[in-house]
Image: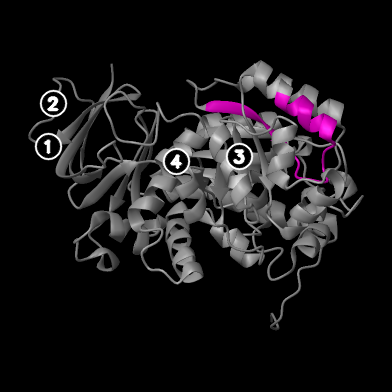
């Protein structure tokens, strides 16, 4: 048995009572949390393998990002300041449609490196195209030490909403092949790496699948006992398409085809209505809120406080490199809070504790892992992050939760432990070769731009 004792810091437990323990300690044995409490109360085992002095640090559960595009880290900054359809047609799809397996692997490693260094320990990847190299990405995930859900894309139509046949040829996939590959990947990877890797269905958004294909996805997920994620009501076009094609609102239609349940995470949900919130709440589906992406693409603002009051489980997502430009969930928490305050002209909505719940225990619930992760409690998986709090922008230390949400950023994360293993210490990632990844990402992004023919304009002269 291996053990780690972390002591002296302030523990934000996120437990049922939301205890914040000053001068606390956490004892980890193998991959589980064995004891949590005041440092004077936590019994030190005779053979502690590693002792961590956490004085001046916050100790909290690893953050959970429930909407990530691993393959978009490599195209960060390649589609800025443009409308959604242009964003997809002129930049994102042509670039991703020219990916090869090595591009997919390097992009995933770059994304995971950034997530680890900013305190994310678990993520939900939403759409992995076959050309990105699923196996290579899964191997990199296993090596990284992170906990991740990899969703293989399933599509049947090359459109987006009412815009038919607009997808880049390199992004089009055959539905039968997609369904077969999901099952193949599930058999090979689901439950691998001590349960850290899971495989879901990644359904294309409205206009990308037929009703029959959605039904087959729902049936397949039920048979395998796995999950489904998809973009839903990100833009108003989703509503117009659902009403025109099916005479229903988007969530009503997804409920009709069997794709609303506790194993489903819908990304965005900006244009969902109150009646749709009630459907999601009743069936236990989750919505991954992506505020920075929605703001940058001018998609709108999701009614997060209202959905929470209705009983919808809301989690948090950074989305992708072109739509957010970073994968820092600490930054995203502040954005999520301030955006709702401004929308509702109410400083009381979306307070810091609520946002931290969304980024931790709600994220665990969205992935069906609430009994395993999302809190610092005895018996839970040892997914922990340590945040340095003795910095000018985090002093005075009056309220640890408020400081974390409103003042901190990913660079403040010092240590990351996942599944009981040290993944990052003193900001050095132990599982991934940072210098190699940065070098390869630069090289491959340059070659990708050349290969795709996509030209990135600059408003100011570059000399």
In the displayed structure, 341 sits above or below 353; it is: below
Q: Nearer the viewer, mark 1 or mark 4?
A: 4
Question: Going from the N terminus, do you reach mark 3 or mark 4 first?
Answer: 3
Residue at the limit of the structure toward the right, as seen here = 165
Distance Cα–Cα, label 1 vs label 4 = 28 Å
Question: Going from the N terminus, do you reach mark 1 or mark 4 first?
Answer: 1
User: Dot 2 lies on which element?
Assistant: loop
Q: Nearer the viewer, mark 3 or mark 1?
A: 3
23 or 362, which lies in front?
362
Residue 355 percent coordinates (x, y): 40, 53
Q: Which residues are magenta?
A: 197-218
Q: Which mark is residue 44?
A: 2
Q: Which residue is mark 3?
A: 279
Quadrant into which the N terminus falls: top left
Q: Is residue 146 magenta?
A: no
- Who's the residue at 29% across and 67% down the image? 393
Q: Nearer the viewer, mark 2 or mark 3?
A: 3
Number of on-image labels = 4
- Who's the residue at 48% across and 42% down the image? 311
- Who's the residue at 23% across and 50% down the image? 57
In the displayed structure, 86 sits above or below 245; it is: below
Q: Quadrant of residue 266?
A: top right
In the displayed structure, 69 sits above or below 346; it is: above
Answer left or right for 62 relative to 73: left
Residue 362 percent coordinates (x, y): 44, 40
């Amino acid at each position: 048995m291996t053990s780690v004792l972390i002591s002296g810091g302030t523990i934000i437990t996120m437990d049922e009572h939301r205890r914040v323990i000053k001068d606390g300690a956490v004892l980890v044995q193998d991959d589980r949390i064995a004891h949590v409490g005041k440092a004077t109360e936590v019994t030190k085992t005779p053979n502690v393998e590693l002792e961590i002095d956490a004085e001046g640090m916050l100790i909290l559960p690893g953050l959970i990002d429930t909407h990530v595009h691993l393959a978009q880290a490599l195209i960060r900054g390649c589609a800025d300041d443009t409308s959604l359809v242009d964003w997809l047609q002129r930049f994102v799809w042509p670039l991703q449609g020219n990916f090869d397996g090595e591009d997919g692997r390097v992009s995933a490693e770059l994304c995971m490196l950034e997530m680890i260094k900013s305190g994310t320990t678990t993520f939900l990847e939403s759409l992995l195209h076959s050309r990105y190299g699923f196996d290579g990405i899964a191997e990199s995930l296993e090596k990284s030490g992170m906990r991740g859900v990899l969703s293989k894309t399933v599509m049947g139509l090359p459109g987006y909403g009412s815009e038919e046949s607009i997808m880049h040829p390199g992004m089009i996939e055959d539905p039968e092949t997609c369904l077969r590959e999901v099952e193949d990947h599930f058999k090979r990877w689901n439950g691998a790496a001590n349960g850290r890797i899971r495989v879901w269905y990644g359904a294309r958004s409205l206009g990308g699948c037929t009703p029959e294909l959605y039904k087959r996805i729902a049936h397949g997920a039920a048979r395998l006992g796995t999950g489904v994620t998809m973009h839903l009501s990100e833009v108003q076009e989703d509503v117009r398409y659902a009403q025109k094609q099916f005479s229903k609102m988007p969530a009503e239609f997804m409920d009709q085809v069997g794709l609303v349940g506790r194993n489903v995470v819908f990304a965005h949900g900006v244009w969902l209505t109150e009646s749709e919130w009630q459907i999601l709440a009743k069936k236990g589906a989750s919505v991954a809120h992506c505020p920075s992406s929605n703001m940058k693409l001018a998609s709108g603002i999701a009614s997060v406080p209202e959905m929470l009051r209705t009983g919808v489980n809301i989690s948090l997502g950074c989305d992708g490199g072109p739509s957010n430009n970073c994968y820092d969930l600490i930054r995203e928490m502040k954005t999520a809070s301030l955006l709702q305050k401004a929308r509702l002209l109410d400083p009381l909505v979306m307070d810091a504790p609520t946002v931290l719940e969304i980024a931790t225990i709600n994220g665990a619930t969205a992935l069906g892992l609430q009994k395993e992760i999302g809190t610092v409690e005895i018996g839970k998986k040892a997914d922990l992050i340590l945040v340095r709090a003795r910095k000018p922008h985090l002093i005075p230390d009056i309220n640890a939760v408020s400081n974390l949400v409103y003042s901190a950023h990913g660079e403040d994360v010092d240590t990351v432990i996942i599944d009981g293993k040290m993944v990052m210490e003193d900001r050095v990632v132990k599982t991934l070769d940072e210098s190699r990844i940065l070098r390869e990402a630069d090289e491959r992004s340059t070659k990708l731009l050349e290969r795709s023919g996509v030209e990135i304009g600059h408003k100011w002269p570059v000399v």
